[in-house]
Image (spheres, rainbow, N blue to C red):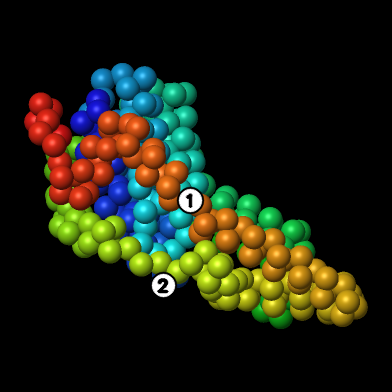
Amino acid sequence: MQGLVSYYATIQSLVEVGLGSFLHAFHIPFSGHALSLNQGLILTQACQKTESRKEAVTATNGISIITAILKSLSPIGKRLTPMLAISMQGFLFSFGILLLGNNILGMILGISLLSLWGFAQPLLFAYLFFGEKLFLAVEKLWLDIAEKLSLSPEYGLRILIGFVLLKVLLSWVVAFIGWKYPTWITEKYFTKIMKYKDLTTKSLKNKKSLSATRGALKDLLNPWMILSMALTIAFMLLTEKSDYFQVFIYSLRVIAIAYLVFFVLRAFPQSWIKKVLTSFPTLSKTVDRLLDREPESTDQQY
């Protein structure tokens, strides 16, 4: 079991620490959703090689937790946000297995729950920063657009539901591939991922990142924050008829909360992570794989 968890945690970490950091740093659209489907494929593949429901749940959570911890060593970008996503997605995946068992139905339920977290987490952070005003502003903007284009207001909700259903359907395909073809498509895919090992290792060893203070300021200026702030302020001025003082106080509150959250996400003490790395053998084994110091193992399968 330790070898299996270490092997698949290594695979996922290579993607999250290497490719994931690059995609998040340059704000590539839908990168989080693609990475979550990748996690679903890896977890399905791992569960296919376990023999019981208990082993599958243990492996799923072990792989996700180890990957989340290693993500904290990412050379660029925030750390705790991806850590939260990876951990929660692993937990939701294991919940599906716990309910329906270590079989294709359990995989489908688990990966469906996993895929939904990619939509839930951004909404939770948006509500934390802007409150309900942002959602009211988006609703008002859509109603105005729908009226000018002579569209039904419900059309926007159908589009959103369509995106969610599309991802869920894609996740079912991923689960089917991972479960049905454990040594064909997925193994070839994992072999290609391993080619990025040197690049990821170099990133971990030569990590240069912004300070928490500068990084938080940079996060405040990302397009999503600026657009959301502009939309909310316009809603307050044009729809709610708020005065400038109310807008000023609201803006200060949003900036303060967002900066505090961004600062904490970047300032998470990496000394804590390093202590954890030395406390768990499976985690240490995964780090050894990533840094080319892999110890000898009697588990030749992995």
Q: Nearer the viewer, residue 62 or 260?
A: 260
**Label 2 neighbour load within 10 Å: few <14, some 14-19, many 20+:** few
Of the numbered discs 2 and 1, the one sitting upstream in the chain is 2
The spot of residue 24 in percent (x, y) is 42, 65
Q: With respect to residue 69, does 96 lie above or below? A: above
Q: Is residue 244 left or right of residue 149?
A: right
For the point 29% across and 54% down, which residue is it? 15
Q: With respect to residue 99, does 86 lie above or below? A: below
- Residue type pointed to by label 1: Pro
Q: Nearer the viewer, residue 82 or 270?
A: 270
Give the Cα distance between marks 2 and 1: 24 Å
- On the rendered image, what quadrant is the N terminus found in? top left
The spot of residue 89 in percent (x, y) is 45, 42
- Residue type pointed to by label 2: Phe
Which tag is nearer the camera, tag 2 or tag 1? 1
Q: Nearer the viewer, residue 209 or 218?
A: 209
Q: Nearer the viewer, residue 177 or 23?
A: 23
Q: Is residue 140 left or right of residue 272?
A: right
Count every numbered label the image shows and give the total. Answer: 2
Residue labelled with disc 2:
26
Residue 149 lies in what quarter of the image? bottom right
Q: Secondary structure at mark 1?
A: loop
For the point 23% across and 32% down, which residue is it? 4
| Numbered badge on residue 151 | none
**Label 1 neighbour load within 10 Å: few <14, some 14-19, many 20+:** few
The spot of residue 246 in percent (x, y) is 87, 72
For the point 83% across and 74% down, which residue is it? 247
Residue labelled with disc 1:
269
Q: With respect to residue 155, does 300 lie above or below? A: above
Q: Secondary structure at mark 2?
A: loop
